[in-house]
Image (cartoon, helix red, strand yellow):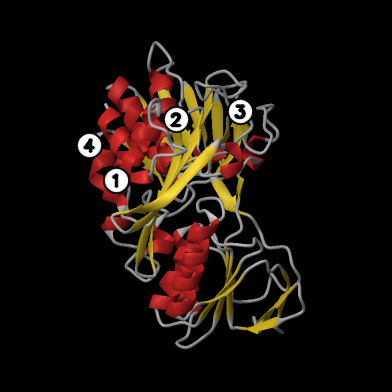
Amino acid sequence: MNKHYVIVGSGVAAVHAAKAIRDQDAESEITIFGEENHLPYNRIKLTKGLFSDLHSEKVLIKKEKWYRDNRITLHTSSRVAAIHPERLEIETADGKVTAYHKLLLCMGARNRALTVDGASLNNVHTIRGLGDADRLKAELTAGQRVVVIGGGVQGLETAWALHEGGYPVTVVEAAPRLMARQLDETSSEQLHLVLEQSGVQVKLHAGVTAITGEESVSGVVLDNGAEISCEHVVYSIGIIPNTDLVKETGILTRSGVLVNQHLETSAPHVYAAGDLAELDGRVEGLWGGAIEQGKVAGTNMAAAEPADYRRPVPVTLFNAFGISLFSIGNTDERECDRSVAGELDGVYTRIYIKDNRMAGALAWDGAAASLLYKSAVEQGVSLEGLDSESFGLEEIMAGVAARIQ
């Protein structure tokens, strides 16, 4: 059998895997099967650039010419209906069978569904794919009020885009603060203030118990009994890996498809990467992680010696409501030994320390400023000799900068 690398799914992990395979193997056949009728695109732009032209080439991960030049066959609008690991075959919904030498599963994830009464009404939206963004924009009418459920990164980016588009927005978050996974209390409170000053209402510690309306949305009921009148609801409350395709194959799953450090599944010659893959009890669900997993999985499918996947340091760059901030690495105070906060050049900053090394950082600054902190966390820069309990933030970071390789 000639070598044929088959990739199911057409997200960012799939594209980077295909490139990594071609870098290792210049001759063998590579085929990608994607359900959507578009070339693979940058999903994180769906919320950040909701009202931009999401169908332009600028949104694509790679242009059509790249697939031709690299002799990668991309089947769009092609749903894989079954996987047969025992026969090294996959089957598409139209009954066509394709044999593979190595198989990579990149089916990604879907947004966690809202399960309250009224969630099936017209004008209840979630944004995962290009079609979701198109539908939301098509159904919006000038002046209509929107409730965004979810005060994480995606929810706030959506709220910003809608606010910029001229729509009155209320953000509802069940947690006691915004972006709780990325920010400390001080930053969350400041972000809350910025949203309110921009004209976006924020309801914290507020669960949604129902969406009201006859055929279309007329309001949202909170767990304290209050009701917010609106014509649209957009929710962003987490993701669920798309494991349905492998349920009958014997490939082991838990939350996602279980993989080892080489991103191999429990089935021979079958790998998984991206939002589908679960490693050491965790599904990452991060853009940077999906890219890196795609690269490692693709390399391991084609290379003689496998490489271990190492989780990249998580980086969140948030640019909305006229502010820029970043959060890098572990910013959970409960998992660190201590933290040091202060102002550097007039910018609020906090670093997190574990085992006398930089574990994470956050600051109200732009992407360029984040590079120092990212390098420090990636390299595990030692703070030996830098008394983080008595030194100020400026002294500590000056010492860290001097130690960066």
Could you tell me if residue 334 is visible in this image? yes
Mark 2: amino acid: Arg
Please state which amino acid type lies under the numbered disc 3.
Answer: Asp
Pick whichever, 167 or 32, lies toward us.
Answer: 167
Tag 2–tag 1 contact (CB < 8 Å): no
Residue 117: quadrant of the picture = bottom right
- Foreground disc of the pair 2, 4: 2
Residue identifier under label 2: 357
Pair 3/2: label in front: 2
How many other residues sit within 10 Å of disc 1, few (<14), some (14-19) or many (≥20)? Answer: some
Closer to us: mark 3 or mark 4?
A: 3
Q: How many marks?
A: 4
Inter-mark Cα distance, 1 to 4: 11 Å
- For the residues labelled 2 and 4, the Cα–Cα distance comes to 45 Å
Q: Quadrant of residue 93?
A: top right
Q: Is residue 362 above or below residue 217?
A: above
Residue found at x 68% / y 63%: 114
Q: Which residue in the protein does label 1 denote? A: 62
The residue tagged with tag 2: helix, strand or loop?
strand
Question: Where does label 4 land, which residue?
Answer: 69
Which structural element holds mark 3? Answer: loop
Label 3: how many Cα within 10 Å (few below 14, some 14–19, many 20+): few
The local crowd at label 4, few if under 14, some if 14 to 19, many if 20 or more residues have their Cα within 10 Å, is few
Instruction: From the viewer's side, name the closer residue of 188 and 245.
Output: 188
* Residue 164 x %, y %: 38, 76
Q: Nearer the viewer, mark 1 or mark 4?
A: 1
For the residues marked 3 and 2, what is the alpha-carbon distance in whole angstroms?
Answer: 23 Å
Label number found at residue 280: 3
Task: Say left or right for 392 vs 389.
Answer: left
Asked which secondary structure carries label 1, the reply is: loop
